[in-house]
Amino acid sequence: MPGLFAERTVRSAPEFSGVVYSWEEIGNLLNRPIELPFPVELHMVRHGETEANARSLVTGVQDSPLTALGREQARAVGRRLDPRYDLAIHSRLSRSAETLQLAMEAGQVGVGAVYPDARINERSLGELEMTPVRPIEEFARGDFDYAPAGGDSYAEVSRRLLSFLIDLIRFIRRTDATAVLICGHMGPMRIMAGIFEELRDPSQVLARSFKNTEVFRVRWHRLAFPAFLASIAAKSA
C-alpha cells in the first residue's frame, strides 16, 4: 500500500513473523491462562464488501478486491473507530490491508505501527472457494476437524490464531501497548471472539457471524486455552 500507510508499516517485529506453534507448544504455554499486565482495548473489524461477497460466493484465501461499496464501508467504519491505537494488524490479503488503510485515513486514526500477519488470513476453503455460499452441515454442528477438500479445518485456523495471540501478548508486554486494532476476516474473527469470550460450545463459536466492517470490541485481560477446543487438546496430548 502506498503513501502514509506504507510508511507506518513495520515488517521487522519478531512477534509478527508468522510462526505457528505446535499444539504441544501451545498447550505448554497455555497450561495456565496468560494474564496480561493490564487490560487492553482490542477492536476487530471485518473487511469491507468484496466482489466475491457481492456475488454471494465463498471467498476463502482468494484475494478478491473491495467493491466501491466496500471502500465506502471502510471509510465509514474509520469514523467510528477510536482516535488512537498503539498498533494495528492486518492480514496478508489485500481486502484486509485496504480496508484498514481507508479506515485510518477517513477517520484520521492515529496508529503507532501497522503490521501484516498471515496468521489472521481467512481460512482456506479449498474446493468450496468461488462457489455460491450455502450452509455447511459440518460447520453448523461445530466440527473443528472438518476441512473441505484442499482446505483448512477450523482446528488448524485455531492453532495459528492462538500462536498469533500468544505473540501479541509478548508484543504488549514489550511495548506497553494498551489499544490494538485488528482488521480481519469472518472465519478468524469468529474463532478469536470465542477465545476472548471463553466460550465452551464449538457450535456456538462457528455460528458467529460478522457483517462487512462490523466491529467487535473487547477489554482483553487474559488468554486461556479455549474450552471449545478441548477435544483437539485431547487428541494432541
Image (tube, grey):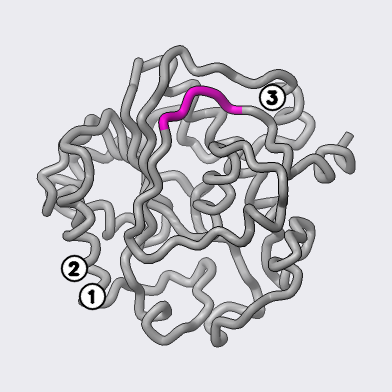
Q: Residue at x 58, y 49 (%)?
A: 191
For the residues labelled 2 and 3, the Cα–Cα distance comes to 40 Å
Residue 30: mark in rendering: 3
Which residue reaches farthest top? Answer: 37
Q: Residue at x 50, y 74 (%)?
A: 59
Q: Residue at x 21, y 76 (%)?
A: 68
Where does the image place residue 141, in percent across and percent down from the top left? 75, 64
Q: Local crowd at mark 1 within 10 Å, few (<14), some, or many (≥20)?
A: some
For the residues labelled 1 and 3, the Cα–Cα distance comes to 41 Å
**Secondary element at tag 2:** helix
Q: Amino acid at mark 1?
A: Leu
**Secondary element at tag 3:** loop
Where does the image place residue 214, in percent across and percent down from the top left? 35, 57
Asked if residue 154 shows in the view, the reply is yes
Where does the image place residue 223, in percent across and percent down from the top left? 58, 27
Q: Mark 2 — residue?
A: 72
Q: Quadrant of the C terminus?
A: top right
**Along the polypeptide, which appears first: circle 1 or circle 3?**
3
Residue 119: mark in rendering: none
Which of the pair 135/177 is nearer the observer? 135
Q: Local crowd at mark 3 within 10 Å, few (<14), some, or many (≥20)?
A: some
Q: Local crowd at mark 2 within 10 Å, few (<14), some, or many (≥20)?
A: some
**Along the polypeptide, which appears first: circle 2 or circle 3?**
3
Which of the pair 57/81 is nearer the observer? 81
Res. 71 image quadrant: bottom left
Q: Mark 1 — residue?
A: 69
Where does the image place residue 45, in percent across and percent down from the top left? 36, 52
For the residues labelled 2 and 1, the Cα–Cα distance comes to 5 Å
Magenta stretch bounds: 219-223
Q: Amino acid at mark 2?
A: Glu
Q: Is 27 within the magenta?
A: no
